[in-house]
Amino acid sequence: MIKKKKLKVIDLFSGVGGLSYGFACDDNFEIIAANEILPNIAKAYSLNHPAVKMYAEDITNFNAQKIKKDLNIKAGEVEIIVAGPPCQAYSTVGKRLANDPRGKLFKEYYRVLKEFNPKFFIFENVRGLLSIQGGELFKTIISCFESLGYKVQYKLLNAADYGAPQIRERVMIIGSKLKTDFQYPEPTHYNPEEAPDLFNKKLKPYLTLEEAIGDLPFIKSNEERFEYSSDPKNDFQKLMRKNAPVKLMDHNSPNNNEKLVKIMELLPDGGTPENLPKNLRPASGFKNTYCRLWWKRPATTITRNLSTPSSSRCIHPKAPRPLTTREGARIQCFPDSYQFYGSRGDRNLQVGNAVPTFLSIVMAKAILENFKNEYKIVKEKSPNESLRLYRVSSLTV
């Protein structure tokens, strides 16, 4: 009996595991190792994925020799590498400094790809990557990957199009050495505020914030609750609460001052400081700060400052407070069983910098389908060689 083949995956710049979540949840894949430089984030990753060898170190120290020594896995046995290098240098929100060292981390990814030579890779980042330096940096990145012999494709994916309760666009660059072409996942949801696709009636409307977090208690400033406010009200909430602990984790709010609480109380649904009395309007802040989210819409892109009203739109649509870590995790599609580690700031960093897990799930399924199609071609061309090249006949979508 042939042992079931699992596609081996390495997760670089892993964060808390958003980009690799879809691979971790699919028995056709095996994440063998992960790399994350920040200790508390690496700890959180390991809490959720104890079987994965975590290298909590600078990416410059990560190499194929370590994997061979520690796991007895040769470089050529790794089929897939995924990575989401720190994106602040590329973000359209930040200053996007061309000389920011974080913007050069793709070179380390290039080095790792050259060492391992996987059949497939993902390089995920923010939309701003497409335009920094007038698009020259993006062209350089693509050229580097193509120089390694990869067929490179890229597409801008919006998490809301795949069922996440958040408008969050991510650039998904893929590189493949498979003979069959990769097909990006088709959207499953649409924006009901725009003209619907009349030819695709299978699409569902975007998931709203109410649908995502409506079963979590409406705590006030400086409060914490451990019980759900209701039974699950929809499929998303049921999914998020699957295998959840008895006590709700990370649902607590910071202790905001009286003036800030008053501001948050007076904001209407989706409101901004323009909706406030002039004497209460903050003296400083950007256009998207001190703003309330919408109850009947997806959230806007959340950040590591999801509990800081002066940083971005993050005020709860109903309660006079910013989002809790658990609400942020729901918006990022992490189940309630998922653990974060460290201070509130640490946990919010882990949540806010992650890739929504729903994006990872659809990408993992699309990649699995690509490998299955490759196996079919190999088998048709040379039946005797098919198992030697790929033992993926038992892969299931």
Image (cartoon, rainbow, N blue to C red):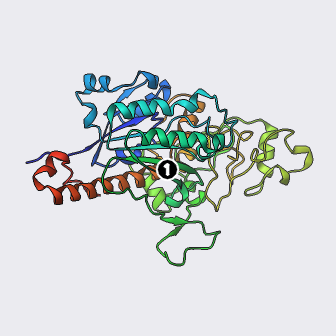
Between 37 and 208, the one lying in front of the other is 37
- Work out whether residue 306 can be spotted: no
* Residue 183 image position (x, y, % from top left): 40, 59
**Which element type, helix, strand or loop, lies under badge 1?**
loop
* Residue 119 image position (x, y, % from top left): 32, 44
Left or right side of 236 for 64: left
- Badge 1 amino acid: Cys
Check disc 1: other Cα within 10 Å, few if <14, some if 14-19, many if 20+: many
Left or right side of 272 for 111: left
Left or right side of 390 for 105: right
Q: Which residue is mark 1?
A: 333
Left or right side of 389 for 126: right
Residue visible at 72% across and 47% down? 320
**Number of marks in picture:** 1
* Residue 74 image position (x, y, % from top left): 24, 30
Between 129 and 397, the one lying in front of the other is 129
Residue visible at 72% across and 41% down? 309
Residue visible at 69% across and 40% down? 221
